[in-house]
Structures are given as C-alpha cells and as structure tokens.
Image: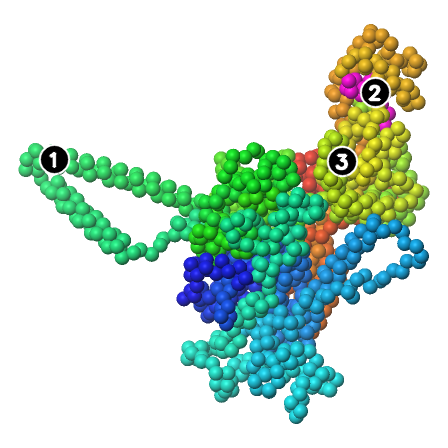
C-alpha cells in the first residue's frame, strides 16, 4: 500500500527544511537501481519482495533487457524519523559511460548525492568521474559500500580480511576526494598569489617560498568518508540490509555498558575490546586482537550468513529469537536460502532506514545552498560575479533564502527534456469510476442491448414473404435507413479511432526541472532565458520590475511562455500539481516549443542564464541516417528534431553533403537513439550507414630511418629524388616549391604573390590549443568587437589574466631560433578561428596581432589592410579540409613568408577606401610613395616604369587604370582570388612535407580475472590496441588493464570481449585524445632492402592508407585502387583434376 499520496507530498513540499534533493551515482552495475528499489519499497510503492528484481525506475524496455540504466528518473519519497517528516526527491542515474550526460543533468538539480561502490570491484573509472562531477557542482556526497554479501558468498573472505578490504576501499575513495580538494586549494592559492602580486609592489629582501601551498591551513576533515562521521553505510541492497555504525553503537552501549559516543568513535579503527577490564584499547593489530568492527559487527553478519546457507535450523531460530524478529512460514520454508536471508536481514537491519536517515542527517536541505555554488551557477563563461549588473547580484539573496513567498522572484532551471507517451499523462489516464457513473453505464448497456434485440426482430420480420406491397415498401425503407445509420456509425467510429490513435502516438515532452526560488504556479507566464542571454543588455531595454505578462520589446535570447502543467515525478507515474514551492524537483509540461535541451526560467529579466552543464563524455560516434522509403523523409526530419530534444548528449546535424547525421557518445548510446528514432519519434523504417569515423590530418618532421630501420643514406636519397621529381611533375605550373617546402603562388590576375611554408607544431602546443579552444573563441570575439569599435562591457580582468597566461604558456612551448617572435606574430587560429592550427606572418610592413584584446591594438594602415581577411579566410578553408581526405587539420603551423601586392592591387585597395576620384588620386600618390621600396608588378601590357611615372597625374590615367581593374575582374573579385590562392598555397605547402593521418583514440579500462587475461590481450592486439599498464587489484584476483584503442577499431569491441571471455571482462571506453598513425599513407618501397622486405607491390596492409581510402570512398573522392590484383595468371574457379 502506498504510504503517502500526492496530496501528502504537496504538503511536504512546502516545508523546505525537510526536503532532500539527492541522486544516486556509481559505476555501471554497482547496484544503484537495486538500492533505489529498496528505498521505494519502504514507501509501499512496490513490494519489498520485488525490490532488486523489479528495477522500478528502469521504465524503458531496453533498460530492462540490457540490465543497465540509460536515463535519469526521479521519484519522491516520504520518510519519517522520530517526529520529523522528510520529503526525499530521489534521482536514479545511469552508470554507463555512454550516458554520463544524464548524470550531469541529475547532479545539477540536487543538493547531495549517494555514491555507491561495489565492495568487490572497489573504485572504478566511472566512480572517479561521478565524484568529480559532484565536486564540480558543489554537492555533498555520502557513501554506500554495496554488495558486501559478495565478500562472504563469492570471495569467501574471513571477517578480518573483509575489514581490511573495506578499509582499503575507503582509502581509495578518500584518495580521489583528496586529489580534487588539493587541486582546488592550489588553484585558489595561485589566484590569491596573482592578486597579491598585482596589488603589492615587489617586496624587498629575499623571498621565502612556502612549499606547503596552504594545504595545512584548510580544514578538509568534513570532505572525507569515514563511518565514525556517519557518512558511510555498509549494505547489501539485493539482500535488503544496510547499517551505519551508529546503529550498532546504540545496540552495544546497552549491552556492554559503554557510552554510545565512545563506541561511535571506536567501532571503526584500530581499537579492540579488553573483556576483562571492560575497556576499549588502541592497537589491535600489534597485539593480535580482533578489531571492534570485526568482533561486534562483521562476525554477527558472517555467522548469520553461514547459518542460513548451511540450513542450520537451530542456529537460525536462536538468532531470530535473540533479535526479536518475526519471520513468516513462507520465507522460512522457501527452498532458496537467499529469500530466508532477505526476510531476516531486512527486518534486523533495514537498508532504507540506514540510508535515508544518513541522507537526512548528513545531506543539506535546499536552504543550506552555499554562496559559492550560487555564484558559480550565475556566472556564465568567463564573467565573475562582481561584473554582473547590481539587479542580478541582488538575486543571490533570493537563491540563498530559497523562499516560497509570493514576492520572491521565481527562478527555475530545466536540466533536460524527456519524452513521455501521451497516454501516461495524468489527464489521459483512465480514472476509477464513481458509483453514479457505474449506474449510468449499466443503464446505457441495457438500452443498447434492447435496441439490438428490436433491430434483430425487425430483420426477421422483413425477411418473411410479403403479404402486402405496402408492408414491403415500409420494410425496405426502414432497412435502408438502418444501413445508412450503420454506415455513419462505422465512419464515426473509424474517425474517432484514428484521432485516438494519433493522440496515443503523440509524444509529450516534459521538462525535468528544479525551483530555486519563489513558487511556480500552473498557468503562470514566465521568461525563458537562452544560454546566450545577457541581463546587462536587456536591462537597458526593460525595467527589472517588468513581468512576462506585459507587452515587451524584443530582447535577443529571451522568450515568454505559459507553464501549462506541473507534475510530481513518481518514477513511471506522473501526478498533477497546482503549484510547487522553492527547493523542489518537478516536471513541467508545455515547454517543448520554447526549450530545446536545457534553459533557465524566471519571472525577473535580471536573472542570468545558469552555467551550462558540464558533460564528461564527448559525442564521437557518427552515423548517417536515411529512411528506407524516400517518401518518409519529413517524418525522419521531425523524428530527429524530437530525438535531439529528448536526449541531452546527442547531436543532430545536416552535413554539407545533405546527409542527416546523428552524433552519439558510444555504441550503446547509438543503439538506444536509433531504437527511439524507429519506434517512438519517427515511427518509420530507417537505414543506417556504417559509423563515420573522424580523422585529422597533420604533417611530421622528415623521418631519420626508413621502413626497414636503416638510416636514410645516399642510396635512399637517390630513390627519393626520383620520387620527388615525379611528384613535382604533378604540381601545376605557376607554383614554385623550394627544396625546404616553401610554396610560392600568384593570384590568377597576377596582382599578388604569396609564399607559404607549413611546419608541424610541437605536441604540447597542439594540446594547449585544443584545451583552450573556448578561450581562443573569447579572444576572437573580443578582437571583433574592438575592430568594429563596439563599446564592449568592461573586459573582465580574470579573462585578461587567463589570456595572458595562455600566451605565456605558448611562448614557453614555442622556443628556439625557428619560433622566434612566433607568438606575437600569430595572425589567426583555425579552423573556425579556434582550432589547433596557427597562421603566422613573417613579412615586413604588416602588423596585426591576435592579442589585440591585451591592449596592444595597432590600427593597420598599410596596403595589406583590406585583404588580410581574405588571407585568413583562405587559411580557415585550408585547415577545415586537408588534401589527403578532406578532414580537418591538426597541429600545423602555416607561415606566410612573403606577400606582394602589385600597384593595381594597391590602387584597388585604396579605391575601396574612398569614393571621390580626386581623393583616390591623392591616396594613390600617398600609397605609392609609401611603398616605393616594394617590388612593383603591373598586369597586362604595362612594362615596369619608374615610380615617378607610375603615379597617375590626370583623370585619363585614372580611367585607364580603371580599365585595367575591369580587365582583372574577369577572374572575379580580388579578395575572392586571394582566398582561393591562399587555400591552394596552404594545401601545396602541406603536400611538400611528410603527411600523416591522426586517429581518434579511446582509453579503455578492462577488469578481468587471470584466466581470461590472454583472450583480452588477443582481442586488443587484433584491433590495433596498445596496452599501457596492467595491475592487480589488491585483495582480489582481478586485473585492471589500461589500454588505448582507435575509435575506428572499436565497433563491436565490447561485445567481442564479452563473448571471448564468457562475460568475465567488460570494457569501458572513453574518448581520450588524437594520435598520429605512424605509417605514411603514400609510402612505396624505394631502396633495395625495402624491396626485399616488402616486395614490389608492398602488399602488406598499410593501416593509414586503408583508413584514408575508406574516408575518400565515403566522401565520393577519387581513390587510387587497382581493380585487377593478379592479372598475370588466369584464375579458374574449378580445381584442376
């Protein structure tokens, strides 16, 4: 029986101090959903016998089949502790790495979390990831060490060994927390140091450096998990028991006569009980005594398990009577000892009491939200809290109060949208009938039955031989009337059925949200703030007191909407609510047209959008999707829109080729998205391409040794010269390539000449550029606003410091003669102006820096000022698609060594600057006198003239030049020619160097037992994997293997490993980095040794070439392949007799 109905829950929602918003986080298969089942069964929503088997919060069919959670779902529970009543909004989250985005959406709405750890497997990769996510969102964790029954039944450890094992697990978890804490303290310390450096002048005398870094002063005792702090529960969710040590402290204080406070401190740790003196002494191990925890707690649990497993009836009865439990006859007679065990344990140590009382004692209520967390939520991007408008800063107090008064501004954060079947909505559900309705229906049924009987009688009469004509006529007319009525009835039924079906098929979107301040009411009008909304800009247009009901001017990234329905989330069910006060988690209906994935809702326009969610997994697996029947295309497009809205991590794109592409986080995630698309959103048959694997193109330094590890000597040189000569023949005329890779190329109208060289960037620099892509984007935005002379809001000092630090790091990594002044001469980053490639300028007479925002902006006045954007655009295009297989470049630096513009080009440049012809003449005179030192090339018939003659002195000359310009225009606009020329120059400069492909790599963590280790290695080596390390987990026979694996080889990897190891090993794949594939895709044997080793055709498979050709085929580019492999001998199918 359900203990608390929706009405009771609505009452509890008003008592903010008694609310706990928590989520359950853990690695995959550590028992989150089973634990959630146990907590739900305590409210009578499901039977306690089904807890752990039902997996109530896994409401999707594929979740039940696979046995893993794929989405975060919420349920509200009621918990009574003494005279205090609590409302616990529990969110269960997935543990699989593919669905870590769902964890982010859950964590944002909570104030605390339960970290679940498997007692056998200990800390796993995903445990570390969820701890980090909880830390980043500033939410407080408590710990449940689950599956302790496995230590008894599977590993067969003694209580003493189990105690040491549990101690070890606690240390591992605290080590993870410690590293997070240390990094935070060191960051804060560094910030303080930079601030103090800015404020104080250089101190006189010797500086003494303090290596402690402030870690000693900061108190971190509250962060760590320890049973004596009351933030650890030991449990076995499947057997229904769990306890914190305070339970045993109370129990034994009465038996032994020692104060509970003393027992609490000593039950966990190196203490033992001196029975003679009735005292607790320290140093159990040195004296060879049993620790208290083993003696008083574990021994009892172990003996209970032993008695039940061995069916020792006397001992069991003795235990039951001593504990004062009542066990039903059904459980005690059951053939499965686990059922008997569950019945005893769930009464003796109910897990729900232990976990929920820990949650209520240790985790904060919404009222205890920290100021630090509020500021973090309100500051988007690089802005600090102090730089926000004063009206916005005032909202901080509303957050901290979390008040539900009518005057408080309403602030709601929507973390995700989820789709539910329209049938599942409360207003569409069949409700129980009242007595009157039942009576009415009975009457209706009787009337229908009577009508049917009458109709049948009439039919029988009409079929009889007619006695009179009149009767025949009347009979016929009645019959036709009846038929007509039947037809109309049938059509009505058909149409109503169709309408009903359409309504049933419709997916409704509900926003998964939390109220941070104010009271949300049904039908309320509210502002929806997009992620780019800036309160500073909108407050100029609107007053801070205006509401969503007023007629307001258009403000970018802000819309108004009405909250149609509010729901209480109850796992698989939804309950209607009229209003929801602050501090609660809720579902909101009717936002699908205004919210895509997440949004901030507020009644105050001063509210800033919340910081975007930080996702751990990056979407990397792409597939192209198309309908089986082309006529279904509109459904597919609509379905993909809905899928994009329903999943926080998926990306839906239409590529330049017109393909509809789905980008997902991994194989399991991809499978779920495709199932959803087929069965829920598009409801059509679709065909899915092979996964589109991303690559990057780069260049390397020329190799020192050849493919057979011989040093490249003269003999090799001869062969290479032949090869390069052949390659040079391929280069079209008009392009010069020097021996050191400098490419010189002119525009089609010969007005400008460019010389470009490509150089590989050091690995550290590429990594630095990748990590700071957001910062580079910020730099680009600041520069644009400076160039357009926009009055930007004060550039934040913190951002400036970050840019300076980034520049410093670049300078440290780009050292040596080759990179002198390189950082100051950076012209642009690419592709998309924030990628891991750099464009440098290295010619005289031009000064433009990407670091303008740091205050060294120089107005460009030279002849290049108009066309520099064309060069940058050409570079952006070249880096976006490389020459090998049109994939983006990475880790390449292009240096423009020379850029010459002829006189006509200069005139064109000046002509663009002003409209008056006379001014043009004057400007031309100025420009030429300025650039007299430059080489002057004039297109067409004009010979090189003296600089004095080249200045146009009369209008005729000007018109003549106009004619020349018009002549040049047959090649299109000059800026366009420059873009194309720059792109070509970059491409040829790349091809002049040794080119390589870069593959995306997964880090792969596999847990396997010793007997299947060989098979795991076999699968890894077959798929080009590389093992980094293997270590044995302490106290178990499980090995942890860390490896890297190319994404291209990863499809079906998890299934293959599971099959080969009979399910004893399961991998976790997380995207890690890009790695250069060492083999040259264009390599052919050139020396005698290579001919001997590889054969004339070099038939052994070249991995890089295979990948390159696969991508080229997919994109429809030319692939150099031999169709006939063995032309020299006839291949017959039948064997010669």
Q: Earlier in the sequence, mark 2 or mark 1?
A: 1
Mark 2 and mark 3: Cα distance apart in space: 25 Å
Q: Residue at x 88, y 48 (%)?
A: 705
The residue indicated by pointer 3 is 783
Q: Nearer the viewer, residue 235 or 371?
A: 371
Badge 3 marks a residue whose secondary structure is helix
Instruction: Categorize mark 1 by other alpha carbons within 10 Å: few (<14), some (14-19), many (20+).
Output: few
Label number found at residue 960: none
Task: Measuring from the top left, give residue 886's x and y in whole percent.
Answer: 72, 37
Label number found at residue 474: 1
Q: Could you tell me which quadrant the N terminus lies in?
A: bottom left
Instruction: Categorize mark 2 by other alpha carbons within 10 Å: few (<14), some (14-19), many (20+).
Output: many
Question: What's drawn in magenta, residue-wise?
Answer: 899-914
Q: Is residue 1121 visible?
A: no
Q: In the displayed image of the protein, which residue is found farthest to the left?
A: 467
Q: Main secondary structure of the magenta part?
A: helix
Height in image: 476 above or below 1036?
Answer: above
Q: Is residue 805 left or right of residue 374?
A: right
Mark 2 and mark 1: Cα distance apart in space: 102 Å
Task: Measuring from the top left, give residue 821's x and y in whole percent.
Answer: 89, 39
């Amino acid at each position: 029986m359900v203990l608390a109905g929706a009405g009771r829950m609505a009452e509890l929602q008003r008592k903010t101090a008694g609310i706990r918003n928590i989520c359950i986080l853990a690695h995959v298969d550590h028992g989150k959903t089973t634990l959630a089942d146990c907590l739900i069964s305590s409210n009578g929503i499901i039977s306690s016998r089904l807890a752990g088997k039902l997996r109530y919060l896994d409401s999707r069919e594929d979740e039940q089949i696979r046995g893993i959670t794929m989405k975060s779902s919420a349920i509200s529970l009621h918990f009574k502790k003494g005279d205090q009543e609590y409302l616990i909004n529990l969110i269960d989250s997935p543990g699989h790495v593919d669905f870590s985005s769902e964890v982010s959406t859950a964590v944002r709405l909570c104030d605390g979390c339960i970290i679940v750890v498997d007692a056998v497997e200990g800390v796993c990769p995903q445990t570390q990831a969820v701890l980090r996510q909880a830390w980043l969102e500033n939410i407080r964790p408590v710990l449940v060490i689950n599956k302790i029954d496995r230590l008894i039944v599977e590993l067969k450890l003694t209580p003493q060994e189990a105690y040491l094992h549990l101690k070890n697990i606690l240390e591992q978890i605290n080590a993870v927390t410690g590293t997070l804490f240390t990094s935070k303290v060191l960051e804060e310390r560094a910030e303080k140091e930079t601030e103090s450096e800015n404020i104080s002048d250089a101190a006189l005398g010797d500086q003494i450096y303090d290596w402690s870094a402030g870690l000693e002063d900061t108190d971190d005792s509250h962060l760590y998990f320890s049973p004596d702090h009351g933030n650890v529960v030991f449990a076995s969710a499947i057997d229904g028991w769990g306890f914190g040590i305070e339970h045993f402290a109370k129990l034994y204080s009465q038996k032994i006569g020692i104060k509970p406070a003393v027992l609490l401190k000593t039950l966990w740790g190196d203490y033992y009980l001196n029975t003679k003196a009735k005292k607790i002494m320290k140093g159990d191990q040195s004296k060879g005594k049993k620790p208290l925890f083993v003696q008083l707690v574990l021994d009892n649990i172990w003996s209970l398990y032993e008695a039940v497993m061995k069916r020792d009836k006397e001992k069991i009865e003795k235990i039951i009577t001593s504990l004062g439990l009542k066990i039903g006859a059904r459980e005690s007679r059951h053939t499965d000892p686990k059922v008997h065990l569950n019945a005893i344990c769930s009464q003796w140590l109910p897990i729900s009491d232990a976990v929920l009382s820990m949650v209520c004692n240790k985790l904060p209520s919404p009222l205890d939200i920290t100021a630090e967390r509020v500021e973090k939520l309100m500051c988007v991007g690089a802005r600090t809290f102090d730089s926000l408008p004063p009206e916005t800063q005032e909202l901080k107090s509303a957050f901290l109060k979390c008040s539900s008064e009518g005057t408080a501004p309403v602030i709601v954060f929507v973390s995700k949208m989820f789709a539910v079947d329209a049938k599942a909505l409360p207003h569409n559900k069949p409700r129980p009938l009242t007595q009157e309705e039942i009576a009415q229906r009975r009457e209706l049924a009787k009337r229908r039955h009577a009508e049917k009987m009458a109709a049948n009688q009439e039919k029988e009469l009409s079929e009889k031989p007619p006695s009179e004509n009149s009767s025949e006529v009347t009979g016929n007319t009645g019959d036709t009337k009846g038929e007509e009525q039947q037809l109309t009835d049938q059509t009505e039924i058909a149409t109503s059925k169709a309408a009903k079906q359409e309504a049933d098929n419709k997916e409704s979107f509900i926003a998964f949200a939390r109220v941070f301040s104010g009271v949300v009411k049904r039908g309320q009008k509210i502002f929806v703030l997009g992620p780019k909304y800036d309160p500073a800009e909108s407050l100029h247009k609107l007053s801070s007191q205006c509401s969503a009901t007023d007629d307001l001017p258009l403000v970018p990234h802000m819309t108004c909407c009405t909250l149609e329905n509010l729901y209480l989330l109850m796992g698989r069910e939804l309950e209607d609510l009229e209003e929801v006060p602050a501090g609660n988690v809720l579902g909101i209906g009717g936002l699908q047209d205004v919210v895509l994935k997440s949004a901030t809702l507020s009644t105050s326009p001063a509210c800033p959008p919340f910081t975007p969610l930080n996702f751990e997994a990056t979407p990397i697996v792409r597939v192209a999707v198309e309908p089986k029947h082309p006529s279904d295309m509109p459904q597919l497009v609509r379905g993909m829109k809905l899928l994009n809205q329903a999943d926080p991590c998926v990306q839906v794109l239409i590529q330049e080729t017109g393909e509809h592409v789905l980008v997902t986080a991994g194989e399991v995630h991809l499978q779920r998205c495709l199932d959803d698309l087929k069965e829920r959103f598009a409801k059509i048959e679709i065909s899915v391409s092979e996964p589109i694997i991303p690559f990057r193109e780069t260049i390397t330094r020329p190799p020192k040794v050849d493919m057979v590890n011989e040093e490249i000597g003269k003999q090799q040189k001869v062969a290479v010269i032949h090869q390069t000569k052949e390659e040079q023949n391929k280069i079209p005329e008009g392009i010069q390539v020097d021996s050191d890779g400098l490419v010189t190329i002119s525009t089609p109208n010969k007005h400008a000449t460019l010389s470009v060289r490509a150089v590989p960037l050091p690995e550290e620099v590429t990594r630095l550029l990748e990590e700071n892509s957001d910062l580079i984007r910020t730099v680009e935005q600041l520069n644009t606003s400076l160039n357009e002379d926009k009055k930007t809001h004060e550039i934040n000092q913190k951002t400036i410091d970050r840019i300076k630090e980034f520049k410093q790091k670049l300078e440290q990594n780009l050292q040596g003669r080759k990179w002198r002044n390189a950082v100051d001469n950076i012209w642009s980053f690419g592709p998309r102006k924030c990628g891991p490639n750099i464009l440098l300028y290295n010619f005289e007479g031009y000064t433009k820096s990407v670091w303008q925002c740091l205050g060294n902006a120089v107005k460009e006045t030279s002849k290049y000022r108009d066309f520099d954007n064309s060069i940058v655009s050409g570079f952006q295009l070249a880096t976006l698609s490389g020459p090998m297989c049109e994939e983006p470049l990475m880790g390449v630096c292009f240096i423009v060594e020379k850029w010459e513009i002829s006189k006509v080009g200069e005139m064109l440049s000046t002509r663009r600057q002003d409209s008056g012809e006379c001014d043009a003449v004057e400007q031309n005179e100025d420009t030429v006198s300025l650039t007299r030192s430059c080489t002057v090339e004039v297109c067409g018939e004009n010979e090189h003239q003296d600089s004095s003659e080249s200045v146009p002195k009369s209008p005729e000359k000007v018109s003549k030049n106009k004619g020349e310009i018009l002549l040049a225009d047959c090649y299109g606009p000059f800026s366009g020619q420059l873009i194309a020329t720059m792109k070509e120059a970059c491409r040829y400069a790349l091809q002049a160097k040794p080119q390589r492909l870069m593959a995306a790599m997964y880090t792969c963590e596999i847990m396997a037992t010793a007997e299947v280790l060989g098979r795991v290695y076999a699968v890894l080596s077959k798929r080009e994997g590389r093992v980094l390390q293997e270590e044995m987990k302490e106290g178990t026979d499980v090995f942890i293997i860390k490896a890297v694996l190319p994404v291209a080889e990863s499809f079906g990897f998890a299934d293959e490993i599971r099959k080969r190891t009979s399910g004893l090993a399961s991998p976790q794949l997380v995207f890690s980095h890009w790695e250069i594939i060492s083999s040259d895709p264009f390599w052919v044997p050139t020396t005698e040794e290579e001919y001997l080793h590889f054969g004339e055709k070099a038939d052994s498979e070249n991995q890089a070439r295979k990948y390159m050709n696969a991508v080229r085929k997919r994109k429809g580019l030319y692939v150099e392949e031999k169709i006939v492999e063995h032309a020299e001998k006839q291949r017959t199918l039948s064997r010669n007799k």
